[in-house]
Image: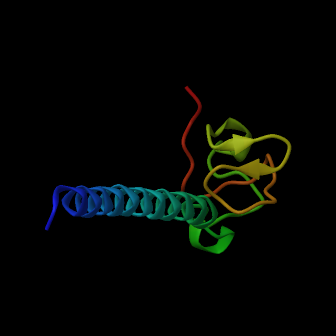
């Protein structure tokens, strides 16, 4: 092979490796983004699984829980919930 052919092959290999690295990186980012979106959806427990009830339990209620988001939402249990409700995932506000 002459020098010109060698340079063309080296450049092609270099370009192929660079392009491959971009493709792999992009695929990894898409995978991470999709996993993050799925995690957001899947992280809330159902009211049944959390043992949610519409009334407080021994002075513990959603309105005094750090997971509660007024007026009727929670970071760990599916909405809607009542501020006077209670579940087993209760975590007292600091």
Identify the residue at the far right of this view. Answer: 71
Q: Which residue is drawn at 48% across and 58% down?
A: 26
In this picture the colour scheme is rainbow
Left or right relative to 56: residue 17: left
Q: In which quarter of the image is the C terminus?
A: top right
Q: Which of 44 and 2 is in front in this view?
A: 2
Identify the residue at the far left of this view. Answer: 1
Place of residue 17 in the rendered image (x, y in percent of width and height, measured from the top left): 30, 60
Identify the residue at the far top of this view. Answer: 94
Res 34 → quadrant: bottom right
Q: Residue at x 23, y 63 (%)?
A: 5
94 shown above or below 78: above
Identify the residue at the far front of this view. Answer: 2
Place of residue 91 in the rendered image (x, y in percent of width and height, measured from the top left): 54, 42
Q: Nearer the viewer, residue 40 or 55?
A: 40
32 shown above or below 90: below
Q: How many labels does the image show?
A: 0
Res 88 → quadrant: bottom right
Q: Which residue is drawn at 75% across and 41% down?
A: 69
Q: Which of 80 and 84 is in front in this view?
A: 80
Q: In which quarter of the image is the N terminus?
A: bottom left
Place of residue 44 in the rendered image (x, y in percent of width and height, measured from the top left): 61, 62
Place of residue 82 in the rendered image (x, y in percent of width and height, measured from the top left): 81, 53
Left or right relative to 85: residue 11: left
């Amino acid at each position: 092979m002459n020098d010109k052919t060698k340079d063309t092959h080296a450049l092609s290999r270099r370009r192929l490796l660079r392009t491959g690295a971009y493709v792999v990186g992009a695929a990894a980012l898409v995978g991470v983004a999709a996993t993050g979106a799925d995690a957001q959806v899947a992280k809330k427990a159902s009211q049944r699984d959390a043992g949610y009830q519409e009334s407080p339990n021994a002075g513990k209620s959603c309105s005094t829980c750090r997971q509660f988001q007024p007026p009727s939402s929670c970071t760990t249990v599916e909405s809607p919930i009542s501020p006077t409700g209670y579940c087993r995932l209760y975590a007292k506000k600091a």
